[in-house]
Image (tube, grey):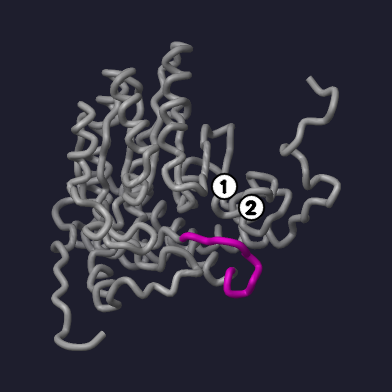
Amino acid sequence: MSGAEPKIHIPAPPSGEVPWGKAFAHQVLLDMLRIRRMEEKCAELYGEQKIRGFLHLYIGEEAGAAGVMRLLSPQDNVVATYREHAHALLRGIGMGPIMAEMYGKQEGCSRGHGGSMHLFDQATHFYGGNAIVGCGLPMAAGLALADQMAGRQAITACFFGEGAIAEGAFHEAMNLAALWCLPVLYLCENNRYAMGTALSLSESQTDLCAKATSYGMATLSVDGMDVVAVHERIKQVVQQVRDTGKPMFVELRTYRFRAHSMFDPELYRDKLEVEAWKLRGPIHTYTARLKSQGLLDEEEFLALDGQAMAEVGQAVAFAEAGTFEPVSELMRDVYTPQGAD
C-alpha cells in the first residue's frame, strides 16, 4: 500500500472479572488451546501435503465455539460451515477421527469422504460441515421442524459466517423459522470479510441484527473475541430458545487471524490491521484476565498447553496410522445398489 499509514480502529481488548471457578475457567482455556494447537498443526500438515483440498482455519475465532458449545445438551443439533473444526471438536468428535478425516483416511469421522469441509457425526448430532455458503441455515430449520413435530425437547444451533447473509437461503430460513416458531439458535460469526470482501462493500445494511429483526426474530450482538461475554450472554439465549421454542439470531463479532483458506493470497486487508486485531486475541486476553485474578499461573498455563499439544500429537499419529479407502468402496453412500430397500 502507498500513501499515509492507514488508521486502524479496533475495540479495546476484553477485560473485567471472570465470573467462574478455577476448574471451569481452566476447562474453557483448554478448549481454546485444543482448537488453536490442532489448527496450527493442520496448517503445518497442509504445507507438507498430508492434508489436501481446501482448509479453512478458525484461528482467532476460538471464543465463539468455546463460549457456546458447552451450553448445548447432548440431544441438541449442531450445524456448521466449512470452517467447522472447532465446533466438531468441542461437540465431542475425537481429535483423532477429525485429523484422520483431514488426511482422507477410513478412520475419519466421515470415512475420509468429506475432508476438512464435511466433518459429520450422527452420534453427537453434528450435521456438518457444509461447503456451500448458507446451506446450513435451511438445514437447521428442517432439523428443528423435525424435533418440533416429534415432540423432542431439543434445539438446533446453526453457525454461519456473515457472507451467508447475502444468500437467499438466509432469508428463506429466517422467514420459515420465525413463521413456524422453530427452536433454532442462529449464530452468525461475523469476521468482517466473508471470503474476502469487507462487509461494508457487500451489504447496504451492515447492522446484521436488523436483517433478522425484520422477520420478527429476537436478536443479540456479542463481542465474539471475549469468551466470557459469549458464554454468559449465550447461556441466557439458549435457555430462551429452549423455553419459548422460538428462534433467535445472535451476531458474534469476531476476526480471523489467518486467510480465508490456505489458497487465499489475502490481498483485501492490511497486514497492520491483522496485527492490531491480534491484540484482542481471545486466548491471550482471557489468559491475562485469569492470571490477574489469581485463577491461573504460568506453570498451570504451560500444563494445559502441554495437554493440548499431546492430544494433537496423538491425533496425528492416529491419522498417520490410518488406511485409505480401497477403490472398491469409493462409491459407498453415493449410489444405492440395485434391489436394495
Taking the magenta stretch, the answer to whether it contains residue 225 is no
286 or 249, which is in the foreground?
249
The image quarter containing residue 260 is bottom left
**Disc 2 + disc 1, Cβ < 8 Å:** yes
292 or 8, which is in the foreground?
8
Q: Position of residue 323 (x, y in %)?
A: 77, 55
Q: Determine which residue is flagged by label 1.
A: 118
**Residue lying at 82% horizontally and 23% vertically, measured from the top left:** 340
Q: Determine which residue is flagged by label 2.
A: 101
Horizontal side of 270 relative to 30 (left or right) equals: left
Can residue 158 be seen here? The reply is yes
Q: Which residues are magenta?
A: 46-56
**Residue type highlighted by circle 2:** Glu
**Residue lying at 76% horizontally and 35% vertically, measured from the top left:** 335
Q: Establish if 238 lies above or below 68.
A: above
Number of numbered callouts drawn: 2
Q: Establish if 8 lies above or below 188.
A: below
Taking the magenta stretch, the answer to whether it contains residue 53 is yes
Q: Position of residue 146 (x, y in %)?
A: 48, 19
Of label 2 and label 1, which has the lower sequence position?
2
Q: Secondary structure at mark 2?
A: helix
Q: Position of residue 186 (x, y in %)?
A: 33, 36
**Residue lying at 71% horizontally and 62% vertically, measured from the top left:** 320
Q: Secondary structure at mark 1?
A: loop
